[in-house]
Image (cartoon, helix red, strand yellow):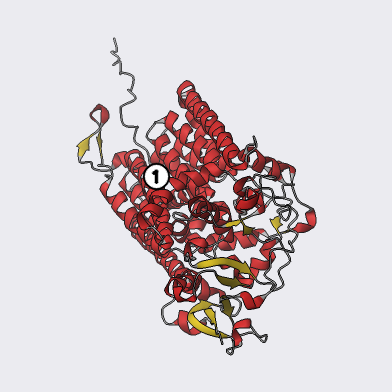
Amino acid sequence: MALTTRQRRPLPSDPPPSSPIYTKYDKPSRRLGDGGREEEKSLGWFVPVFALGMLRYMSATTNIIHDCDEVFNYWEPLHYLLYKSGFQTWEYSSEFALRSYLYILFHELVGRPASWLFAEDKVRVFYAVRLFLGLLSVTTDAVLVVALSRKYGRRLASYTLAMLCLTSGCFFASTSFLPSSFSMYAISLASGFFLLEKYAMAVAVSAAGVILGWPFSILAFLPVVFYSLARRFKQAFLAGAATSVTLLALSVFVDYQYYRRWTSSVLNLVVYNVVGGGESHLYGIEGPLYYLRNAFNNFNFGFVLALLFVGILPIARKKYAPGSGRMFRWERGCLFSWDFRFFKNLNDRELRHCSNLLGVLGVHIDSMKEDKRAEALEKSRIFSTKWFLYPIYPLICVAASAVIESFPDIFRDKYDPNANFVMVTTAKVLRPFVLGLILCASHSRTFSLVNGYAAPIEVYKILQHHDDAGPGSVVCVGSEWHRYPSSFFIPNYIGEVRWLDDGFRGLLPLPFNSTVGGTSAAPSYFNNKNKASDQQFLQDVEACTFLVELQLNRPYPSRGSDLSKWEPIAALPYLDREFSPPLYRSFFIPYLWQQRNVFGLYKLFRRIRN
């Protein structure tokens, strides 16, 4: 009689069966994990926090301001709350109420104590807020890195850490005062909580990232929310609902305190974007190649590898999650799976940002529109992807890192893991080389932007050394209004900053008017049609005490060229993008960067008094 051996059913804690794909379970390990299984030691907290801390400090202290929206929609309202002066945009008019004061108040928690500590030194307050932003980035990115290490191994976590630290996109976005940067922090934190199986916290953070940050980043949060609900529905749902209701109610209450009417800035922004608030002739169109090119500038070959992630998905699924693949289906969902063609008629630049994000990832959007202000900024645009892509920057880093780590698995034979030894070994050697290439190119990009376009911030700092001009002095700015670094760089002896008419016909920011209600006012000169106000320009140029101009090699005169009236007191080089080759202006190449690029002079003038 033949005897049969009854085998026990495999336990969940057992390692997966042998597979032709090399997995992290095949590595020699140094300690015992759950269920007695040997596994490699995960990355601790010290290295990610230390590395991210150094790079975020460098970003906070050297980062330039990449978009005038950051200044006029966030730095200026914060300055008004702290010092009762600053510029207001039409979005902050109580008639439209498109911007949330709750987001501003969150940063006032740091700005207010800093203003007490540093008294009249507003520049230090500016950098204190930036350091706070950097601290948020360090915390959230460190959680993501440690979670990746515990779930998928040290190598993937280390590659991701390197890209989070050194890629240009993450370097600049991490300390930008923008709601999309806050959503980026939330994406990192929610993703980390998801990998650590803290699903309720992941959903709660996602809700905060959408409501307190950028509402349209919900597209990036949906996958982690759906998968968290699938794992722990009751806890995740209650956490998300409680967080959403609390933040929405708090947002409405705070908006009432400042706009003095019951309204929801979050809802207003969504309605404005979806329904539309302007006329079609106010908007322009950018082609998808523009965004592909700009994304490449920020992540270079890392962005290409992130797009190739779908191609190696079967390998990645077997490598990191044998028998499951959920994490990488989630990654794919965050980066590649959404098709929102029903947004084709959206006409605000922010939702156009979302549409173009999807266009970059292969989704065809029929109509992508942008505010007419872009025409004035087109010749001076310096940043590579604009801030609408910020929320998915950490996911780009994870996807690119997963592709790099999977190089050897591409060449492994399906049925004989020991075959193709030479190719597999070569691919292993290629991994640090490719990562190093991405990081070197990113550093080159960062160095080029910081050194080529830092002049505006540095020039305005010179004003604090000319307080002998006396109280009530006037700083005048013409076509350089969109590079104004914020009122934090304007000393207290300056009475006002005024715009000069240099041909721009759109609506410019005007000072908050405390006499008509300040934040609760609805000035008649504000409109949502981008029509210029007759009050936005200073008519009497003789009233100017200081003048800020960018002097380029152009065949037309500038106001500062009249040296009988103006004395230059500061001049710093500024990269002339129009006459500089794209390769050399985008990436710093030693010796060639200075030789091949063309530079103008960013100047600060002081009026000569007779």
Q: Percent from the top left, x then y, of residue 94? A: 66, 45
Classify 439 as above or below 236: below
- The residue under the point 32% across, 58% down is 54
- The residue under the point 38% across, 52% down is 116
Q: Percent from the top left, x then y, of residue 520? A: 63, 45
The residue closer to the viewer here, 320 or 536, is 536
The residue closer to the viewer here, 63 or 184, is 63
Quadrant housing the N terminus: top left
Quadrant of the image occupied by residue 261:
top right
Horizontally, residue 167 falls left or right of residue 599, namely left
Horizontally, residue 68 falls left or right of residue 281, namely left
Horizontally, residue 253 falls left or right of residue 526, namely left
Q: Percent from the top left, x then y, of residue 8? A: 30, 18
* Residue that label 1 marks: 140
Q: Percent from the top left, x then y, of residue 259? A: 62, 42
Query: Is there any visible trace of residue 23 in the rendered image?
Result: no
Amino acid type, callout 1: Thr
Badge 1 marks a residue whose secondary structure is helix
The residue closer to the viewer here, 260 or 96, is 260
- The residue under the point 69% across, 64% down is 536
Quadrant housing the C terminus: bottom right
Classify 436 as above or below 37: below
Q: Few, some or many C-alpha atoms within 10 Å of disc 1 (few <14, some 14-19, many ≥20)?
A: many
- The residue under the point 46% across, 47% down is 107
Horizontally, residue 7 falls left or right of residue 134, namely left
The residue closer to the viewer here, 15 or 151, is 151
Query: Is there any visible trace of residue 18 in the rendered image?
Result: yes
